[in-house]
Image: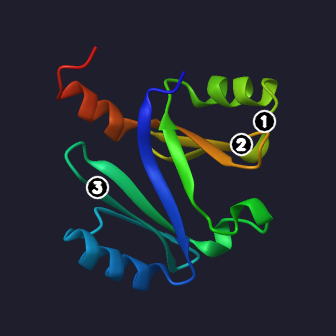
Amino acid sequence: MLRGLTTITYSADDVDSAAQWYQKVLGVEPYFRKEFGGALAYVEFRIGDYSHELGILDRRYVGDTPAVQGGTVAYWAVDDVQTAYERLLALGASSHTPVTEQGPGFVTASVFDPFGNVLGVMENAHYEEVLAGRDVA
């Protein structure tokens, strides 16, 4: 079911300041920016040998649940988000965020595992591109 780690998402009160700080830390500019309501709400960097993704999301969109106050979500690549999400719920997880299209080729969902951790699943076009460029079966 889980194919590999695709994206880690952190949260920040000031996405622009966080993006500038991470740009200095990582030595690369974000390749993707998204606004909600006219304000920068999300940025994403591609880093490392496998172009892993690090996202920074405006903390207003994380939620108030104590288990996610830090706002960190690890997203795992899957072939079908809806199927993976339903399977996780059937195995005892509870919904954190429903299946949501984030843009062409990017669909996410997340659950609380039975232990209070947030587990994200994602259909990720970038992950597929990376696999296509490597000798991976």
Crowding near pointer 1: few (<14 within 10 Å), some, many (20+)?
Answer: many
Name the amino acid type tagged 2.
Val
Q: Are marks 1 and 2 in contact (CB under 8 Å)?
A: yes
Horizontal and vertical percent for residue 4?
A: 42, 32
Identify the residue at the far front of this view. 115
Q: Is residue 8 visible?
A: yes
Horizontal and vertical percent for residue 29?
A: 24, 70
Q: CA distance from mark 1 to mark 3?
A: 30 Å
Q: Are marks 3 and 2 in contact (CB under 8 Å)?
A: no
Which mark sits nearer the N-terminus, 1 or 2?
Answer: 1
- Mark number for residue 46? 3
Residue beneath the point at 71% across and 23% down: 87
Q: Which one is nearer the viewer's eye here, 95 or 34?
A: 95
Name the amino acid type tagged 1.
Ala
Query: Quarter of the image holding residue 136?
Result: top left
What kind of element bears circle 1?
loop
Identify the residue at the far top of this view. 137
Kindly identify which residue carries mark 2: 111
Residue beneath the point at 21% across and 68% down: 28
Position of the C terminus, as image quadrant, is: top left
Q: Which one is nearer the viewer's eye here, 105 or 42?
A: 42
What kind of element bears circle 3?
strand
- Mark number for residue 93? 1
Q: Is residue 99 visible?
A: no
Q: Which one is nearer the viewer's eye here, 5 or 40?
A: 5
Horizontal and vertical percent for residue 15?
A: 47, 78
Name the amino acid type tagged 3.
Arg
Query: Quarter of the image holding residue 113?
Result: top right
From the viewer's perspective, tell me whether residue 76 is left or right of residue 96. Answer: left
